[in-house]
Amino acid sequence: MSEHPNAAIARTAYRAIEQGDMATFAGLLDEEIVWHESTAGFEGDYKGREETMALMARVFQEAGVQMHEMSIHDILADDDHVVVLHESTMSRGARTITAQYVDVYHVRDGKATEHWHLAVDPKADDAFFSG
C-alpha cells in the first residue's frame, strides 16, 4: 500500500525542520494557515505563513532551542487531515529533553491550512521551555 500524498507532505515538512531547512517547511504552509501553539512561552494562535514562520524563528533562534533529532512514530492521513505522532530531542542551554508530541493538521491542495501542537507530557514540556 502506498503512502497517502498528505502523509508524504508531512514527512517532507518534518525532515525539513530536522535539517533546519525552513524554506522548504514554509513552502508547505498555506499563505493563510492558522497555527495553534501550546508550547509554554509561545502559546497562542498565529495567523498566516509570516506569523507562523516568525514563531519558528523565535523558538529556534531567540529561545535558543536546538533540534537534535526528530523521529516520526506514525503519520495518519486522509484527504483533509494529517496527524503526526513524533518524538523530538532538543536542547536549550545545558538542558536536553526527549519528548513526544501530536501534531494535527488540516490540509488543502497540498498545504497545511491549520495546525494544533500538543505535548504528550505538557508539564515536562512547560518545564523545558519555561526554565
Image (spheres, rainbow, N blue to C red):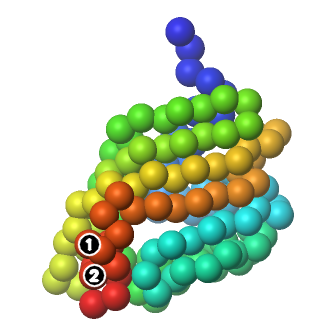
At 22% from the left edge and 68% from the top edge, which residue is drawn?
97
Task: Name the kind of residue labelled 2 in the image.
Answer: Ala
Image height of 43 relative to 72, above or below = below
Relative to residue 125, is residue 17 depicted above or below? Answer: above
Q: Quadrant of residue 125?
A: bottom left
> Circle 1 is placed at which residue position?
124
Q: Residues within 10 Å of mark 2 (few under 14, many from 20)?
A: few
Residue 127 seen in render: yes
Q: Nearer the viewer, residue 64 or 42?
A: 42
Which sits in the foreground, 13 or 107?
A: 107
State the residue lying farthest toward the top. Answer: 1
Tell me if 69 is positioned left or right of 80 in this view.
left
10 Å crowding of disc 1: few (<14), some (14-19), many (20+): some
Quarter placement of the C terminus: bottom left
Q: Seen from this angle, which residue lies furthest left?
A: 94
Question: Decide: marks 2, 1 in contact (CB < 8 A)?
Answer: yes
Q: Amino acid at mark 1?
A: Ala
Residue visible at 41% across and 86% down in the picture: 63
Q: CA distance from mark 2 to mark 1?
A: 5 Å
Residue at the image point whose x is 52% and y is 82% from the top: 42
Q: Residue 88: where, in percent of width, then height?
A: 32, 57
Residue 127: mark in rendering: 2
Secondary structure under the numbered disc 2 in the rendered image: helix
